[in-house]
Image: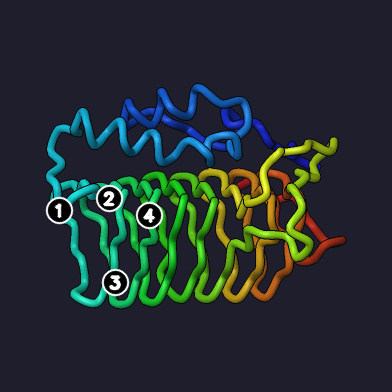
Amino acid sequence: MNKKAVLTKDLFNIEEPSYMKEFFGRYEYPWQMLPHIKDLISELLEKGIPGYTLLKEGVLIGEDVSIAPTATIIPPAIIGSHTEIRPGAFIRGNFICGENCVLGNSSEFKNAILLYHVQVPHYNYVGDSILGNYAHMGAGSICSNLKSDGKNITIHGDTEIESGLRKIGAILGDYADIGCQSVLNPGTIIGKHTQVYPLSMVRGVVPENSIYKAKDNIVVKEKR
């Protein structure tokens, strides 16, 4: 079976922008970033980002961002260039989105980071989560971020890692692809280039370069 990656450096390739590369480089594990997203946004709002303008107080946007009239953006937030925000999208603060992303109709986002070319196009929830470059969430797929008992979340990889956090959604490595109507349970990590079948209920760490068909049916992708 391929590697069950949980380290930040093994899940994401961060070359640009420089502020994201520096930020991601500070944390061994990606969920450690979640409590600091708001601070990063505050820092960037104060310094400014070349080519970005203030849409309203607390919201910076890049060039050629398309925002539907019925979308809602609650600050603080940063929206990357050439990103499309579709009707009914609800951005609920502490949110950073990279360039060339799609924030879909009736989808909700809060305390999350999306890197470049991320697609979250239809009826999704992304809270307390990090989605890597070119990650895709199928229609209706959800990042569940709170356990039913309200206790802190444990990351279930090759070893058990206590996060110390009550809320963690999902961590998607670069090019991860989540099938329609899937639920990613709190603290789920999907490795790079891994696909999850539609209607899946996923918990724990799924190895990179894999296909998740069911809990006990995870296969390694064939090399081409």
Q: Residues within 10 Å of mark 3 (few under 14, many from 20)?
A: many
User: Could you tell which of marks 2 and 1 lies nearer the N-terminus?
Assistant: 1
Q: Secondary structure at mark 2?
A: strand
Marks 4 and 2, Cα distance to the nearest angstrom?
A: 11 Å
**Residue where numbered disc 3 is placed:** 86
Q: Residue at x 59, y 34 (%)?
A: 32
What's the amino acid at mark 2?
A: Ile
- Looking at the picture, does residue 208 appear above or below residue 141? above
Q: For the residues labelled 1 and 3, say whether their Cβ atoms are less than 8 Å apart.
A: no
Q: Nearer the viewer, mark 2 or mark 1?
A: 1
Could you say which is closer to the camera, residue 125 or residue 72?
Answer: 72
Q: Amino acid at mark 1?
A: Leu
For marks 2 and 1, give the CA distance.
Answer: 10 Å
The residue located at (36%, 62%) in the rendering is 91
Would you name the residue on which mark 1 appears?
55
Q: Secondary structure at mark 1?
A: strand
Residue 53, given in percent of the width and then of the height, sits at 12, 44
Q: Residue at x 59, y 62 (%)?
A: 143
The secondary structure type at the circle numbered 3 is loop
Q: Rounded to the nearest whole Å, what is the CA distance between mark 2 and mark 3?
A: 13 Å
Mark 1 or mark 4: name the one nearer the start of the chain.
Answer: 1
> Mark 2 highlights which residue?
79
Q: Are marks 2 and 1 in contact (CB under 8 Å)?
A: yes
Circle 4 packing at 10 Å, graded few (<14), some (14-19), many (20+), is: many
Image-based side of 24 in relation to 72, left or right: right
Q: CA distance from mark 3 to mark 4?
A: 17 Å
Percent from the top left, x then y, of residue 100?
Answer: 29, 52
Name the mark on residue 93: 4
